[in-house]
Image (spheres, helix red, strand yellow):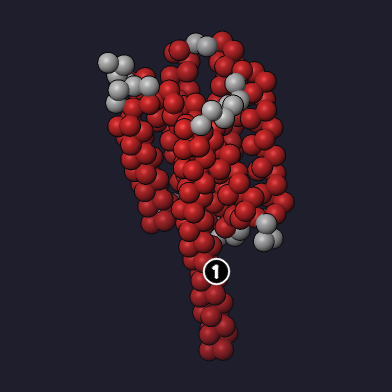
């Protein structure tokens, strides 16, 4: 019994250490991914690079974004995984440029951007803390969150053509709520060992943060943007 107990103890310690390593690597890579995002956003705002606009631009954005995501999943177990992920975050930073330009058109634009950044950081801190310390299993949320995301995505595409302000506002609120819940779900998956690849984990959490930030920034612009 004693050798078996020792083996079980060492095995459990090894599993926990592996989980902790994935968590550490995920947070480090998540922090690193913000550098190309900021650089891409800065480049998009300060230069005359053409942006993806209109219906064709929307389709091209989805094609490039999902192409990157596919490439990340294909290379996540190789040395190319991290560079491909960072290339994706640079692209997503570039795609922030139109929203940032619009926000900077407000006299209080920089304050709105900082407010959205602070709000996103607070959401991440709260959800990551709950995911880490809570004894509740949130894995059952996955199917509901996926369905909600599909509904929001389809509604966003429809409203791209319909341009209904009330629907746009409702969708922004839904995005903040759904992707905040995704943060809770994704972080707990990493902490509990449900996700063992730190590149995939970083990609999921990065997309959650990105969507919360963009939705918050638009909401702040709608509610508090000052043209004076």
- Outermost residue toward the bottom in this view: 2
How many other residues sit within 10 Å of disc 1, few (<14), some (14-19) or many (≥20)?
Answer: some
Q: Position of residue 187 (x, y in %)?
A: 48, 51
Residue 176 vertical position relative to residue 55 in the rendered view, above or below? below
Residue 69 vertical position relative to residue 59 in the rendered view, above or below? below
The quarter of the rendered structure image containing the N terminus is: bottom right
Q: Position of residue 144 (x, y in %)?
A: 55, 35
Q: Residue at x 67, y 57 (%)?
A: 80
Q: Nearer the viewer, residue 132 or 65?
A: 65
Quadrant of residue 221 within the rendered picture: top left
The residue under label 1 is 18
Q: Position of residue 195 (x, y in %)?
A: 58, 56
Q: Residue at x 41, y 56 (%)?
A: 132
Residue 38 vertical position relative to residue 162 in the rendered view, above or below? below
Q: Nearer the viewer, residue 217 or 95?
A: 95
The quarter of the rendered structure image containing the C terminus is: top left
Residue 107 vertical position relative to residue 197 in the rendered view, above or below? above
Let me know if residue 135 appears in the view.
no
Quadrant of residue 154 within the rendered picture: top right
Count of marks, rendered view: 1
- Outermost residue toward the right in this view: 74
Q: Residue at x 70, y 44 (%)?
A: 70
Dot 1 lies on which element?
Answer: helix
Q: Is residue 214 left or right of residue 158?
A: left
Let me know if residue 64 appears in the view.
yes
């Amino acid at each position: 019994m004693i050798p078996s107990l020792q083996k079980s103890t060492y095995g459990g310690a090894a599993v926990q250490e592996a989980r902790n390593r994935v968590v550490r690597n995920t947070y480090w890579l998540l922090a690193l991914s913000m550098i190309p995002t900021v650089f891409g956003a800065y480049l998009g705002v300060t230069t005359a690079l053409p942006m993806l606009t209109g219906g064709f631009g929307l389709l091209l954005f989805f094609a490039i974004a999902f192409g990157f995501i596919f490439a990340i999943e294909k290379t996540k177990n190789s040395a190319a995984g991290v560079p491909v992920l960072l290339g994706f975050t640079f692209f997503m930073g570039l795609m922030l440029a139109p929203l940032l330009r619009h926000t900077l058109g407000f006299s209080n634009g920089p304050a709105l951007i900082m407010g959205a950044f602070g709000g996103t950081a607070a959401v991440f801190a709260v959800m990551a803390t709950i995911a880490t310390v809570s004894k509740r299993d949130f894995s059952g949320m996955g199917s509901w969150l996926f369905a909600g995301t599909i509904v929001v995505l389809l509604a966003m595409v429809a409203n791209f053509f319909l341009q209904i302000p009330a629907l746009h506002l409702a969708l922004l609120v839904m995005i903040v709520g759904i992707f905040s819940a995704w943060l809770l779900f994704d972080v707990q998956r990493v902490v509990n060992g449900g996700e063992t690849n730190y590149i995939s984990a970083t990609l999921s959490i990065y997309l959650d943060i990105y969507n919360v930030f963009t939705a918050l920034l638009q909401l702040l612009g709608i509610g508090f943007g000052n043209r004076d």
